[in-house]
Image (tube, rainbow, N blue to C red):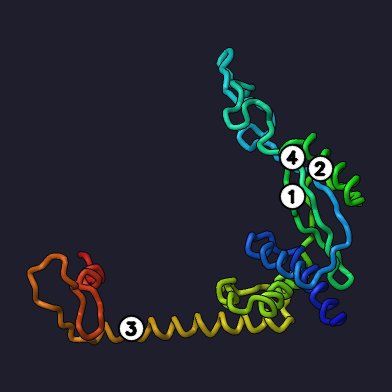
Amino acid sequence: MKLYNLIVGELLELANREFRSEEFYKLKDRILKSHGTKTGVNTQHILKTCRYCAGEGKMPKEVTLYGKTYLTKGDPCWRCNGTGVYQEFWVMLDVYQVGRRSFHLPVDRQYNRELFEKILEALKVALNIIPGKHFEGLIEHTPPRWHLGREAGWWLILLFDHASLHSYYFGKNFQYGFIFTPLLIVNNILYCIERTYYKIRNSLVSLQRKYCRHEFPSTTDPWASDECQKCGVERWELQADEPIF
């Protein structure tokens, strides 16, 4: 079991540096709760500046003076009410260890700093829980080289959520660059097979339609189906293919 958790921890570490989707975070949370050991608590402060005014609090405004146009600050931004802050909150992070790797799991979010500090003080007094680290802003991760993060992510899906493997676009996108890991190689093979299949199928369909003696249903109903009973081509498609002189 220790070896298994060690492998899961290494895979999760690589995937955590690669993926930012909501689906991955749900999978990560499930893995931490089932295979991780809680080792402590950290805190985090997130401050998101307003994108509409770029954190200035006022909307940019063009002013023409002596025939020249200048960019200045105009009315207060309607999105942030002139504060320049789109969103600000404080987060409680549970620290989980899987193998030799540590991960964070958000468990509480507060939009009032005083209330957040009161919660921390209550945890310290009642349960003797003291946060180990504090993070200002997002925790940045550098994606691993050689697509190892994507490879690790697919292994985690295969181990813990294999039924959703297809929905994660396995075999739908070709991975370029230096590829040497097994699932990436299988992904590229499936991609090439699928594209080759569609090309052959489309060629056969085009060939069938080209030499088909079309039989369209004779009906006066304008809403009825108007496709060939042999090859399935629509009448308007044939008319669109006719050359225009």
Task: Work out whether mark 3 precedes mark 4 in sequence or the reverse, and give the earlier one.
Answer: 4
Residue 171 position by quadrant: bottom right
Label 4 with label 1: CB-CB less than 8 Å: no
Q: Can residue 206 be seen?
A: yes
Distance from disc 3 to disc 2, alpha carbons, whole Å, reads: 67 Å
Tell me the quarter of the image containing the N terminus. Answer: bottom right
x 19%, y 72%: residue: 225
Q: Is residue 220 left or right of residue 126?
A: left
As drawn, the residue found furthest toward the top would be 66
Residue 70, x across and y down, in percent = 61, 21
Q: For the residue marked with disc 1, what is the amino acid?
A: Asp
Whether residue 38 is situated above or below residue 165 in the rendered picture: above
Q: Nearer the viewer, mark 1 or mark 2?
A: 2
Question: Please, what secondary structure does the residue beneath circle 1 have?
Answer: strand
x 44%, y 81%: residue: 198
Mark sitting on residue 119: 2
Mark sitting on residue 108: 1
Residue 60, x across and y down, in percent = 61, 26
Mark sitting on residue 47: 4
Q: For the residue marked with disc 4, what is the amino acid?
A: Leu
Q: Nearer the viewer, mark 4 or mark 1?
A: 1
Residue 173, x across and y down, in percent = 58, 72
Question: Please, what secondary structure does the residue beneath circle 3 have?
Answer: helix
Question: Please, what secondary structure does the residue beneath circle 4 have?
Answer: strand
Residue beneath disc 3:
205
Task: Work out whether mark 1 precedes mark 2 in sequence or the reverse, and give the earlier one.
Answer: 1
x 60%, y 84%: residue: 189
Mark 4 Cα shell of 10 Å, populated few (<14), some (14-19), many (≥20): some
Task: Work out whether mark 3 precedes mark 2 in sequence or the reverse, and give the earlier one.
Answer: 2
Residue 77, x across and y down, in percent = 60, 27
Along the line of sight, the residue nearer the viewer: 30 or 159: 30
